Amino acid sequence: WLGKYYASTIAFKELEPALVISEDRMLTDDLEVETDLIIRAKLDLNGHKLTAKRNVTIEGGNGSLVLNKGTANIEGNIITNNDGKIVMDNKADKVTVNGTAIFNGSSKMTAGTLELKGDIEGQIYSSDMHIVVLSGIGDQSISGNEDNDIHFNLLDINNSDSRTITVNNRVSVESSTTIDGKTLSLKCNESRNDKSYISFGKLNADKLVIDGNVTLGSLDYKGSEITINGD
């Protein structure tokens, strides 16, 4: 399996063909992809590193990105369609996404770390010892769909003192939410008619500020001040 894929060194980027994984592959070395990457079969990282310079799309029903103690660094967006999925079941598994993450598949995330620097959309279910890290420099938004929550088990929010997290629809954290600053600022219901629903589990923050209409679910708050500017 080639360790690096280039479509062309002279073609315009918008004309470069994507690398399509249409048969099951297990990496035997690190893989760097300069174009879009489309996964329609099982891509097993097998302890190696995948670097995707542009967007990654995982398509159902056979498309899957299996970390298997590997790491994936995605500089563009990631999209899972239909039953396309990401499989993370080892604490060494690590996925970092610099762009938007759109989850429409049936990903299995029970261990490891998913670091998201852009917005999150769709449906995601993270459980057991799996950690989701929101590490964007600017504001980030979390937008679930109407039928299912965005569900995290362990949620870490970095740079919390200097930015706002926008929550649309339903977001649930089963165990705990941790921030690296003193204040967690949320903006709710920016683009929807119904109240947002938020459940944070155990929240360690000195101050929680919520702008907008919200229904609070499970919240074991360890701070000193909650401000809600809305209903």
Image: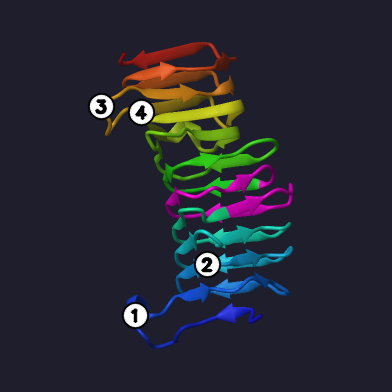
Tell me, yes or no, whether the highlighted magenta stretch contains residue 103: yes
Amino acid type of disc 3?
Asn
- Determine whether 109 is above or below 147 in the image: below
- Dot in front, 3 or 2: 2
Numbered mark located on residue 15 in the image: 1
Residue at numbered disc 4: 187
- Dot in front, 4 or 3: 3
Cα separation, mark 4 vs mark 3, equals: 14 Å
Instruction: Report if the CB atoms under discs 3 and 2 are less than 8 Å apart.
Output: no
Question: Which segment did they paint magenta?
Answer: 86-112
The residue drawn where x is 53% and y is 34% is 151
Cα separation, mark 4 vs mark 1, equals: 39 Å
Please tell me which of labels 2 and 1 falls first in the chain: 1
Tell me, yes or no, whether the highlighted magenta stretch contains residue 146: no
- Looking at the image, which is closer to me, 37 or 84? 84
Asked if residue 43 lies left or right of residue 69, the reply is left
Cα separation, mark 2 vs mark 4, equals: 36 Å
Amino acid type of disc 2?
Arg
Please tell me which of labels 4 and 1 falls first in the chain: 1
- Looking at the image, which is closer to me, 53 or 104? 104
Helix, strand or loop at label 4? It is strand
Return the x and y of residue 73 as percentages of the image width and height.
57, 60
- For the C terminus, the quadrant is top left
- Dot in front, 4 or 1: 1
Numbered mark located on residue 193 in the image: 3
Helix, strand or loop at label 3? It is loop
Amino acid type of disc 1?
Leu
Q: Is residue 204 visible?
A: no
Residue at numbered disc 2: 40
